Amino acid sequence: MKIVKIIAIVLLVAFLGIQFFPVERNQSDSVPKTDFMLVNDVPSDIQNKLQVSCYDCHSNNTQYPWYNKVQPVAWFLEGHIKEGKAELNFNEWDSLSSRRKASKLRSIIKQIESGEMPMASYTLIHKEATFSEEETQKVVKYMENLKDSL
Amino acid sequence: MKNLKISVIVMLLLTVSFTNAQEKEKMNHDHNHNKMMDMKGDTKAEAILSDYFSLKDALVADDSEKAVEASTKLVASLKAFDESNYTAKEQKELADIIQDAIEHAEHISKSEIAHQREHFKVLSKDIADMVAITGTKNKLYQQFCPMYDKGSAWLSTKEEVRNPYYGSRMLKCGKVQKTIQ
């Protein structure tokens, strides 16, 4: 019994302790001119879907709910955002060449179609980020048209 | 005072025209060098091609692990590519191609076979575009399978078709689209 108590205390102290580690926040006030939505004529429902489902990890601005500010969740999230932005940053869309855009669009289409994105660990908490069948079709069709128009 | 101003301006003008001339000379030099390269072939581009063909052979053999190995090598040879001997326009194009190809090769080095083949399709386009600029000392065949993902091409050193998109499932599906020399 005593051991359980000690472990509990140690864990609690560790949990409180890691709250003091600073985390880099992925936040920005301005949207660059190269943003996907600004350079493409995106219908508002698709804009909304991308914003809710993709932009948290694939742009310079994450909407942080309170639990994402608690460690170690924040660390976990930070890693994903870094990786996500390295792979694709919607804010910097227009800085890509046509070749790179086509590659990115191809990946976007495949990932959404196969349900690989948005990630399960993300939709678990962000239910609204999930793609319905209709939304998948709509977004994929839009991305395909965009790819063909490059 | 006025004299000083004038001499400063003259010096500035001289510097500008001098650097300009230097640059022009450098460009000329590049151009000559480029011609030489055409005759000798670009060894770095050949290294990329060689790794690309190992990757293609791995996919033909349905060997995902070998494809991982080959694509890892390919990433390295792509990163080692040196476009400085080409014209400014070609350099821009090549840098773009190489950057795109690196990304696809990296994905191939981290995926299972179905995914590897998806990326191989775009990688093949990148490599073909690269060869169009760099040239190659070997005779290559651009082959085409009309079935895979609405039609997909790849490069091979041999004329006979061995399909990297289907492997043993449809080994001989495809045709030679054109020869590259």
Image (tube, rainbow, N blue to C red):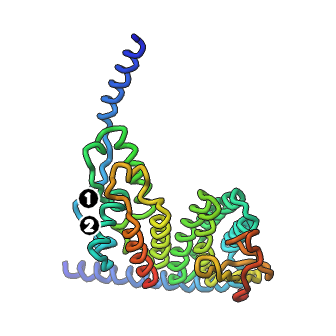
Residue B155 or residue A136, whichever sits in front: A136
Rendered view: A110 above or below B127: above
In the picture of the structure, the residue carrying the numbered disc 1 is: A28
Residue at image location 32% in from the left, 43% down from the top:
A23
Give the Cα distance between marks 2 and 1. 8 Å
Residue B33 seen in this snapshot:
no
Rendered view: A143 above or below A59: below
In the picture of the structure, the residue carrying the numbered disc 2 is: A31
List x then y, in percent, for residue A126.
33, 53
Tell me the quadrant of the picture where the N terminus of chain A can be found.
Answer: top left
Amino acid at the residue labelled 1? Ser
Residue at image location 60% in from the left, 78% down from the top:
B125
Give left or right: position of B150 versus B173: left
Q: Secondary structure at mark 2?
A: loop
Rendered view: A56 above or below A48: above
Tell me the quadrant of the picture where the C terminus of chain A can be found.
Answer: bottom left
Badge 1: chain ID: A
Residue at image location 38% in from the left, 63% down from the top:
A131
Badge 2: chain ID: A
Instruction: Count how many numbered circles sit on residues in the image.
Output: 2
Q: Name the image quarter holding residue B86.
A: bottom right
Residue with the most extreme top position:
A2
List x then y, in percent, for residue B2.
20, 81
Residue A26 or residue B57, whichever sits in front: B57
Residue A46 or residue A12, whichever sits in front: A46
Residue A112 seen in this snapshot:
yes
Rendered view: A41 above or below B81: below
Mark 2, Cα crowd under 10 Å, few <14 / some 14-19 / many 20+, is some
